[in-house]
Image (tube, coloured by chain):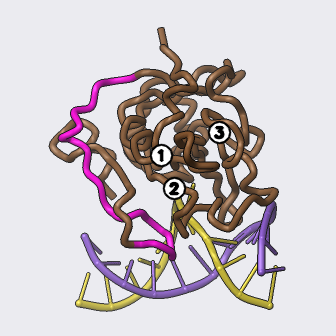
Chain colours: A brown, B purple, C yellow
Amino acid sequence: MFKRLAQSFYTQNTLTVAKQLLGKHIIHQTPLGIRAGIIVETEAYLVHDPACHAYKGITQRNSALFGPVGHAYVYFIYGNHYCFNTVAHDETAVAGGVLIRAIQPTQGIALMAKARKGISGYQISNGPGKLTQALGITRVHNNIDLTTSKELFIADGIYIDPLDIINSPRIGISQARDLPWRFYISSNKWVSYFHKK
DNA sequence: CACCCGATTATCT
DNA sequence: GATAATCGGGTGT
């Protein structure tokens, strides 16, 4: 039913992957049941970009970003939250990733609401820390291979017209704030629901 | 609705 | 010791 994305998908320019991930499914098989949603917002982080965790070189925390493309990079931030990225870059780069910033739930919505302590509606997964909580993604998923894992992976979803993709500066960063490397699906479309505050 | 701020901790300097 | 790719609650207009 889900057609998993292959490693070749992740072996493209990080900006291209960030745009092409819009509309794709992210699937997490948990003991409690399947949870899945459609990606509606992403951000690209390139290795030569001061806002990228890989910018200053490899460390224990960011090592997944320097590993094979198609792996997950999950990190803990602000003492509270996990953020989920896919490692993606072309052959000319040694690192790079795409932060998943928002999803629209499609399966396991009750499980997600429970994980979010009763929160429902668009607030269930309209932020990078929110969607990891909703899906049940934590540090144990860091560096997992999304191209082979049966537990956590990304698969084909709905077609998104390139003309419906909006780009803007990235959220919450202090470096390279001018680079317009945040991507989301246009308002006036069904996913606009997720861009409400 | 816009702005402000505290919580909380792994990681790096 | 400072910082951080966030969140949610609070205050004021």
Residue drawn 72% across and 55% down?
A62
Q: Which residue is mark 3?
A: A72
Q: Is residue A156 magenta?
A: no
For the residues labelled 3 and 1, the Cα–Cα distance comes to 14 Å
Residue A18 in percent (x, y) is at: 43, 43
Q: Is residue A104 visible?
A: no
Q: Residue furthest front?
A: A92
Query: In the image, is A178 to the left or to the right of A64?
Result: left
Q: Is residue A170 magenta?
A: yes
Q: Which residue is mark 2?
A: A45
Residue range in magenta is A157-177
Residue A134 in percent (x, y) is at: 56, 40
Task: Please give the count of numbered marks on the rendered protein.
Answer: 3
**Quadrant that contains the C terminus of chain A:** bottom left
- The answer to whether A62 is drawn above or below residue B3 in the figure is above
Mark 1 and 2 residues: CB-CB less than 8 Å, in contact?
Answer: yes
Residue sitting nearer the eye, A141 or A122: A141
- Secondary structure, mark 2, is strand
Query: In the image, is B1 to the left or to the right of A93?
Result: left
Instruction: Name the kind of residue labelled 1 in the image.
Output: Thr
Query: In the image, is A151 to the left or to the right of A34?
Result: right
